[in-house]
Amino acid sequence: MCDIIFGQDNCFNCDNPDDSTRKSHLSSPSVYRKAKRRALYKNGECNIVLENVSKLRRRYMQDLFTTLVDARWRWTLCVFVLSFLLSWLAFGIIWYLIAFTHGDLTPENIDNPAWSPCVINMKTFMASFLFSVETQHTTGFGYRMVTEECHEAIVFFCFQSIAGLMIQAFMVGIVFTKMARPKQRSQTIMFSKNAVICRRDGQLCLMFRVGDMREKSHLIGTTIQTRLIRSRVTPEGETLSPHVTYLKINIDDHDERVFLMWPTVAVHKIDQDSPLYGLSAADLLNERFEVIVVLEGTTESTGQTTQARTSYTASEVLWGHRFRPLVKYCKTKLMYEVDYSQFHEVFKVDTPLCSAKDLETYLMINEAKVITRFH
């Protein structure tokens, strides 16, 4: 009967689905798997390269603020320094040209006390550069100053003051935004290295562990979303690759917002609505899929929304394993202790090797036999 329901390769002890004599090689993480192909790295970065995008650089330059915020620190700081140096130099050249066109730099006027220059004590290009720096940052040493002689100098003085404020606000805003990004908060969010499949409350479940290492500042309104990425062929023969499917997640019997006081295990029940309903332990060895996990929450201390991501390929899903408990109550300290050294640890448990669909079919047949026998 077992061969008929589950097939010769997926057979387990029908009389006792928890029989420890199941094929251990199917649940071993060291079994040969196909090479990993993932859309999302374990650290949350997307493994996607854009090719043949028209006018890509122009589009990035049109959104310069976001481009600089997303750039590496060395490039952001390089642009930060160059923006001030180049603006000082450009405005210094213009100040030098204003003085030159007015005749302030001619030999007969440069040391003539009766001559009224546009800018007092600006006789060289270095002096014009220093005056540009003093004007842009309102330093005002008092040695060089604009006179009423040149209207163009007065207008340009006002223009540089406004432009300097805009440059400073823009660049300081970029650096501040880059430093205060909630992306750094995600570094203290941990996901288990592997996901596991085992039975819970008599039903096969896909599970992974997530935890927050911060003790003081917790995440508020945390939500966890999971997606399954794998190829799918429609009844019309169309191949959808990649195809994204939603996986419903429950945490402690709640499917809404969670509070990560301690590491918790997220559970996806493999039922009739699950895309993994027909997946068996043998299928897992040859299957190509990826489970994308996205955690979002609001940082308690800053009020900013942060996001942490990870993924599990088929080779990172262990069939017939369960996570080790981490939380215990210490009577001497009168508080709960969390042992993070066991965060990624799993242990083997008796688990049927067939799919949830076949298991449900088998249990229904057994139940029908029992009812028939009593009647």
Image (spheres, rainbow, N blue to C red):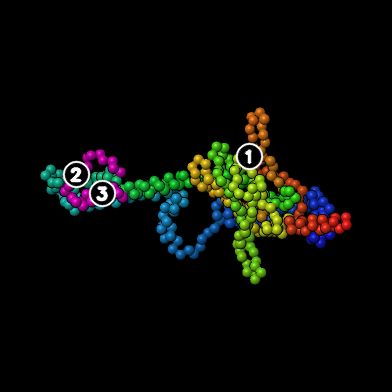
Residue 158 tag number: 3
In primary-sequence order, the first of circles 3 and 1 is 3
**Residue at (66% x, 45% y) in the render:** 252
Nearer the observer: mark 2 or 1; the answer is 1
Q: Which residue is mark 2?
A: 120
Which of 70/36 is in front?
70
Q: Are marks 3 and 2 in contact (CB under 8 Å)?
A: no
Location of residue 242 (image quadrant): bottom right
**Residue at (51% x, 47% y) in the render:** 305
The amino acid at mark 2 is Ile
Q: Residue furthest left?
A: 114
Nearer the observer: mark 3 or 1; the answer is 3
User: Mark 2 falls on what kind of element?
Assistant: strand
Q: Magenta segment range?
A: 137-163
Q: Residues within 10 Å of mark 1 (few under 14, many from 20)?
A: some
Q: Residues within 10 Å of mark 3 (few under 14, many from 20)?
A: few
Which of 298/85 is in front?
298
User: Mark 1 falls on what kind of element?
Assistant: helix
Q: Quadrant of the N terminus?
A: bottom right
**Residue 33 in the image, given as x and y percentages of width and height:** 68, 56
